[in-house]
Image (cartoon, coloured by chain):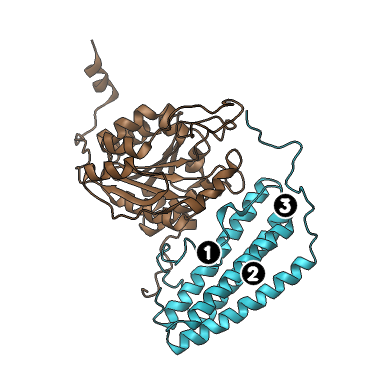
Amino acid sequence: MNAPIAATMLQAKDFKSDYKPVWCPGCGDYSVLTGITKALAMLELRPENVAVVSGIGCSSRIPAYTTCYGFHGVHGRSLPAATGLKVARPDLTVLVASGDGDGYSIGGNHFLHACRRNVDLTYIVMDNHVYGMTKGQPSPTTEPDWKSKLAPGGTGLREFHPLVIALASGANFIARGFSGDPNGVAALIAEAVRHPGFSFVEILSPCVTFRPEQREWKQAVRPAPVEPTDDPARAARRLMTDDGFNIGVLYKGSRPPFNAAIPAESKSVEELECQFRL
Amino acid sequence: MPVPTLEDFMSRAYAMELEATERYAQFAEQLDTHNNREVAQMFRKLAQIEALHARRILEEMGWSSLPAMPPAFAWDGEEGPETAPFDALHYLMQPYHALEIALRCELQAVKYFDGVAAADVPQRVRAAAKEMAEEEREHVALIKDWMKKVPQPAAGWDEDPDPPRMSE
């Protein structure tokens, strides 16, 4: 235990805005919000040095609930917006919030290329295997036999495996958390932010309204019985055989992050237009 | 988890009370948003009680500022022993349910402090842990009394003929 800390140090509550979340009571996203604000406090960051960028969906409401800079963007396009921001303002810590619909379906293609580019971002995906905001349609991570009004016999489609895709596409840090463990989520996010390059943190975040059976996830999750590896081949074997409930850092790569050469002096809009003139 | 000094122990006890306070306050906000004012009020009251305990620890230790917090992820379990689980809520829940949650949390706190008192710890830590466990036992008794004054939910309390969210 350390000596008493200075009262001026920011705490998690200092990163929470006055806007009250409108998620359903018991939703896992409350816990992820707590995890993010605790991580930012642990990292001793200040709200004015952090930006939270999102797309559309329940999870994407997060920027408004923080005191950081926020951008609630277009569906599936949180990563391009965040990439542009980070390249233009490398001094900012940029977190990107998404869900399994926004991130893996509408924004699926951007996910691949954000992993490939390896810009220094932390991508947090709250995965509940369903489109919650639009009332319970199957998402890319929905189990093939999950029955709903829109898919009465289940989709019959194999689930998307985001961690495997992230590894194959070049993400530099891959972890999985569970919203029932907000302190663990905070630690994972803090580690992801510290790790250079594109860090992907998938958080299992139950939808208590449309997938009430996900309350049982707390019995299924367990700490991954392995140390993080920096060997992509070993990580691939682990992730391919993973049942989706191993929690922790699963891969820590050493690929150097994308480093945009920003010109010392910015150009005027007219000068930029000249470059594109046919 | 080792507890080598009284300061360590009290820091942890403070963190525990603070985490419980924050969780109840979050629950109150969630239920306010969903127009369940009665239970929101109950959680707000529980948050105030936990905050009082936290303040008392600061006073007892003569700490003018916050003590160093143990790493947030350093509990033996996923969260502090007195913290209610995030998914414990239902938008139609009743005050009795809130008290059931509080009772479970207080019982976990008793177990935690009893565990510290029974462990191989310095005498001052053991004495403080026994005192804390005793206080938590009093809280258990208070909540049980409180539950007798609150109506028990009827069967089907969570059935809503006009639910706010229906799957398509």
Residue positioned 46% across, 45% down in the render: A204
> Of the residues shown, which amino acid type is indicated by label 2?
Ile
- Name which quarter of the figure residue A273 lies in: top left
Residue A35: x and y in percent read 45, 53
Secondary structure under tag 2 reads helix
The colour chain B appears in is cyan
Q: Which residue is mark 2?
A: B49
- Neighbor class of circle 2 (other Cα within 10 Å; few <14, some 14-19, many 20+) is some
- Name which quarter of the figure residue A134 lies in: top right
Of mark 3 and mark 1, the one earlier in the sequence is 1
Q: Which chain is brown?
A: A
Alpha carbon separation for disc pair 3 and 1: 22 Å
Would residue A271 be found to the left or right of residue B17 on screen?
left
As drawn, the label of residue B37 is 3
Q: Which residue is mark 1?
A: B19
- Name which quarter of the figure residue A8 lies in: bottom left
